[in-house]
Amino acid sequence: MSRRPRRTHAAAFEAKMALAAIRGDKTLATLARQSVLERGR
């Protein structure tokens, strides 16, 4: 079974997720779920 290539994210996306996690606006699980939905669009 071959491994999937590692995903890369834009710096703006990473910064947005990091700031939301630091602020405590949302839980890590919520951020992860939201990021999956955004990537799928």
Image (cartoon, grey):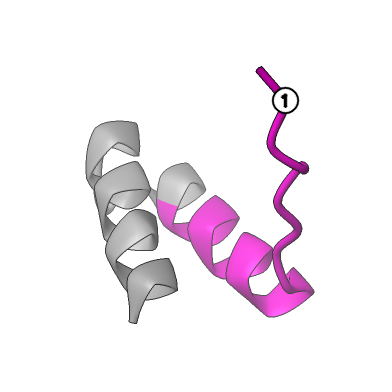
Q: Is residue 3 visible?
A: yes
Quarter-of-image position of residue 4: top right
Q: Which residue appears at 43% of the width and 70% of the height?
A: 39
Q: Which residue appears at 22% of the width and 45% of the height?
A: 30
Residue sitting at the far top: 1
Image height of 11 relative to 4, above or below: below
Q: Which residue is mark 1?
A: 2
Q: Which residue appears at 27% of the width and 34% of the height?
A: 29
Between 21 and 23, the one nearer to me in the picture: 21
Disc 1, SS: loop
Quarter-of-image position of residue 21: top left
Q: Position of residue 36 (x, y in %)?
A: 36, 56
Between 16 and 35, the one nearer to me in the picture: 35
Between 37 and 27, the one nearer to me in the picture: 37
In the image, taking residue 1 as reference, residue 34 lies left or right, namely: left
Image height of 9 relative to 28, above or below: below
Amino acid tagged 1 = Ser
Q: Position of residue 13 (x, y in %)?
A: 60, 71
Q: Which residue appears at 68% of the width and 78% of the height?
A: 12
User: Is 36 covered by the magenta stretch?
Assistant: no
**For the magenta stretch, what is the residue range?**
1-20
Q: Residues within 10 Å of mark 1 (few under 14, many from 20)?
A: few
User: Which image quarter is the C terminus in?
Assistant: bottom left
Q: Position of residue 1 (x, y in %)?
A: 66, 17
Image height of 31 relative to 37, above or below: above
Quarter-of-image position of residue 11: bottom right
Between 22 and 15, the one nearer to me in the picture: 15
User: Is 19 covered by the magenta stretch?
Assistant: yes
